[in-house]
Every structure is written in C-alpha cells, then in structure tokens.
Amino acid sequence: MSSAKLNVRHLVIDLLIASNGAALTIRQLLLAANLFEFSDNSIRVAVTRLSSDDIIESAGRGKYQLTAQWQHWASDMRKRKQEMQPIKPWTQGYLAVFTGALGRVDRTALKHRERALRQYGFRELEMGLFIRPDNLAQTFEETFSQLQSNGLEPEAVMFQISHVDTNTGRKITNLWHSETLNQTYSSISHKIQIWLAQVDQCDVEQAARESLLLGREAIPLLTHDPLLPPPFIDENTRNQFVRDVQQLDQMGQRLWQQFYGLAQV
C-alpha cells in the first residue's frame, strides 16, 4: 500500500485520534514515523507546528495530546465510527437550511458553516440553500443544535420541506452522486475483506502500517457518510461497508497496541 498521500502532519494527527484520547510520547511518534520512512526531524518539526496551530498540546514531558477542541471533534468522529447515527424510514420529506442572509465575507465562519452542513449530509441546492432527506432519527431540534455546535451560525434558518416539484426533485437526486457512493462502498469493502483475510501473514510492523493507510481511505467515508435513505443509496452495500470498516478499525487498534508493546514504549 502506498503512503504517497500521507504526510508527517497527517500521521501525527491520525495517531492521536486513534489513541482514543490518550497522550502519545515523542518516542511512540518517532517509531511510527520510521514505519513510513519519515525522518525524526520531520516529526519534531510537525509536532512544533501542530502545537503552534493549537491542534496538539503538551501532556507532560515528552508527551502530546490533542487540544480540547480537537479532542471534542475526534470524540465525535469515534462515535460515528463505532455506531452510525440512527436513521428512520424516509417519507419523501427534506430538511433545509438557508444561509443566504449570513454573508460570505468571513472566510473562517464560512468554512465552519459549510463543514458542519456537509458533515450532516446537507448539499447546496441553490445559493445559500442546503438540503438533505429528512431521515435522521433524532429530532428536528437536535439536528439544528448539533449543526450549531459544529459551526453553523445560530442566525441560520432551518425548516422542513414536504413536497418539491418534479424538476427540483431531479436536481436533489443528483446532489450526492449516489452511484459513485455505492461503488465506493463496495470497492473499499472489498479491499478491507482482502486485507483482513491475509493480515495474519504479515509481521506487526507491516500490518500496523497497512491498517493505518487503509483506514485513512475508509474511515473518513464512514464518519462523513451522508446517511442517505434508499433509493439514494443501496442500504445493504452501505451496511456491509460499515461492518467492514469497524472490523478494520478494531484490528488496527490491536495492531498498534502490539507495535508499541513490542517497542516497549
């Protein structure tokens, strides 16, 4: 598996997210870097810069952890990874958020707003109008509150839509590229199943390395899944994908614990 898309900054963040809130020593980070052929100096530079960016912080001499803000985000991602958000049968309705009155001058606010909406499966139908199927099991108020907790301004307007015209319905259907999403579920599931079937033949170092690389491809798709109902997606294919990613994550956790244990860090 290629690590071409992995840089040392991503590696440090990924390892800390995978640590389930525990701090990692600089020695652990250096040992992991060696698996991916990153230099010791590159890790030290990355740690310094991530500290300056308030992404990580010191947890004692030679130890680092995610900052409180990033811990909150990582905890949310872990919950999504372990158990998908409950959904309910779709009755053809939609949730919509209007942000047209919020402005786009503040680029940081815009970035946080759009990230929150995308994280909850909303897509932009028209300028400033974001929409998703109304199939989340949580209440309307809970969804709006969670959007705000993740970066949507309180001034945004959220509402429900019970009917749309035929042309708009076609446009909505195309917002999520459902065919590509189904193919991606299937493709990644296949990769994980092949890897799980042969992982016992690898040494711990190789297996840990491969689990992280495969996880980087699979886990973001799971944690940012738009949770679409049929007929937008094939539910059986998605459910299989979820089970496979969770198996990969459990195996990866065990492998990295073994790797650190063998190194006695």
Image (cartoon, grey):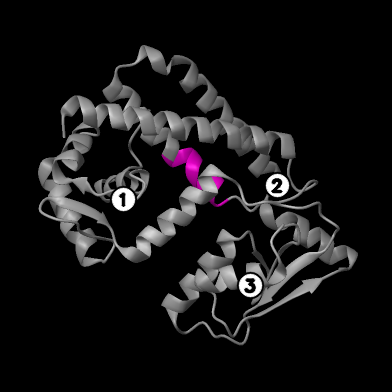
Q: Amino acid at mark 1?
A: Ile
Instruction: Residue 220 in the image: state x and y as whole percent.
Output: 49, 47
Is 223 magenta? The answer is yes
- Relative height, residue 212 to residue 169 (above, below): above
- On the image, the x and y values in percent for residue 202 come to 34, 16
| Lateral position of residue 218 relative to residue 258, left or right | right
Percent coordinates x, y for residue 260 in the rendering: 23, 31
Residue 51 is situated, as x and y percent measured from the top left of the image, at: 21, 62
Question: How busy is the neighbourhood of tag 2: few (under 14 within 10 Å), some, or many (20 plus)?
Answer: some
Quick one: quadrant of the C terminus?
top left
Question: Residue at 16% of width from left, 58% of height from top?
Answer: 48
Please identify the dominant SS of the magenta region. Answer: helix
Q: Residue at x 57, y 30 (%)?
A: 189
Q: Which residue is mark 3?
A: 144
Q: Helix, strand, or loop for circle 1?
A: helix
Three-letter amino acid code of the residue under disc 3: Phe
Alpha carbon separation for disc pair 3 and 2:
25 Å
Magenta-tinted stretch: 216-224
Q: At x 48% / y 56%, what residue is drawn?
A: 76
Left or right: residue 135 compared with residue 261: right
Q: Nearer the observer, disc 1 or disc 2?
A: 1
Q: Is residue 221 visible?
A: no
Residue matched to label 1: 13
Task: Kindly state the secondary structure of the residue where label 3 is placed.
Answer: helix
Q: Is residue 61 rendered to the left or right of residue 38?
A: left
Tell me the distance, in whole angstroms, between the alpha carbons under discs 1 and 3.
29 Å
> Does 155 sit above or below residue 16?
below
